[in-house]
Amino acid sequence: MSNITYFTEEGLRKLQEQLHLLKTVERPGISRQIAEARDKGDLSENAEYDAAKDAQGLLELKISKLEDLVANSRLIDESKIDTSKVSVLCKVRIRNMNNKQEMSYILVAESEADLKSGKISVGSPIGKGLLGKKVGEFADITTPAGMLKFEVLEIGLANVPL
């Protein structure tokens, strides 16, 4: 059974570009390494050949996983996002009730997560805990740092400032 993953247009484009790079640049490069190692003679004691074959296997596995991810991806139509509750591609402003600190995050697919740019995965503990919450509701979330309580202050679209 395949898992459907939701992406922004930018996220899906980056994934497709990465797949294209692996197929058109990395794959031919490893094939050349294998050919060069094969030309050096006895393959039974050729460490370069073994290393290149191992690298080829890892690359093909990575390509296969990315192809599966792209095949099972769906674009999110931002015009149809319900901002009455936290969902994928929503920007949410929350308050940590322990230290009263406020922060904003955009909830995205696992492969688009980037904490430095304020994008957290819907599969992360905080992402999971916030999904479905409405403004004014509280979320008790178990994190590696312990139990945290957050209040949802505001929900909006990812590309619109809160």
Image (tube, grey):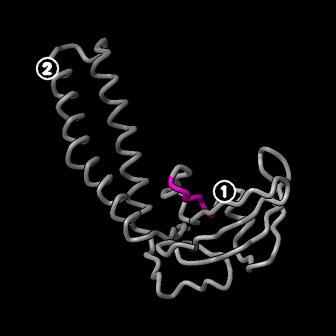
Given this view, does label 2 or label 1 mark the residue nearer the observer?
Answer: 1
- Kind of residue indicated by mark 1: Ser
Give amino acid for label 2: Asp
Q: Which residue is mark 2?
A: 39
Q: Check the picture and name the quadrant holding the N terminus.
A: bottom right
**Total label count?**
2
Give the CA separation, mark 2 to mark 1: 48 Å
Quarter-of-image position of residue 54: top left
Residue 42 belongs to the span the image colors magenta: no
Side of 60 where 108 appears, left or right: right
Whether 12 is drawn above or below 113: the answer is below
**Residue 42: percent from left, percent from top:** 22, 13
Secondary structure under the numbered disc 1 in the rendered image: loop
Q: Is residue 120 magenta?
A: yes
Q: Nearer the viewer, residue 41 or 119?
A: 119
Residue at 59%, 59% in the rendered image: 121
In the picture, which quadrant includes the C terminus? bottom right
* Nearer-N-terminus badge (2/1): 2
* Numbered badge on residue 124: 1
Left or right side of 81 for 143: right
- The one nearer the camera, 115 or 61, is 115
- As displayed, is residue 21 above or below residue 138? above
Q: Magenta residues? A: 117-122
Within 10 Å of the Cα at label 1, are there few (<14), some (14-19), or many (20+) other Cα atoms? Answer: some
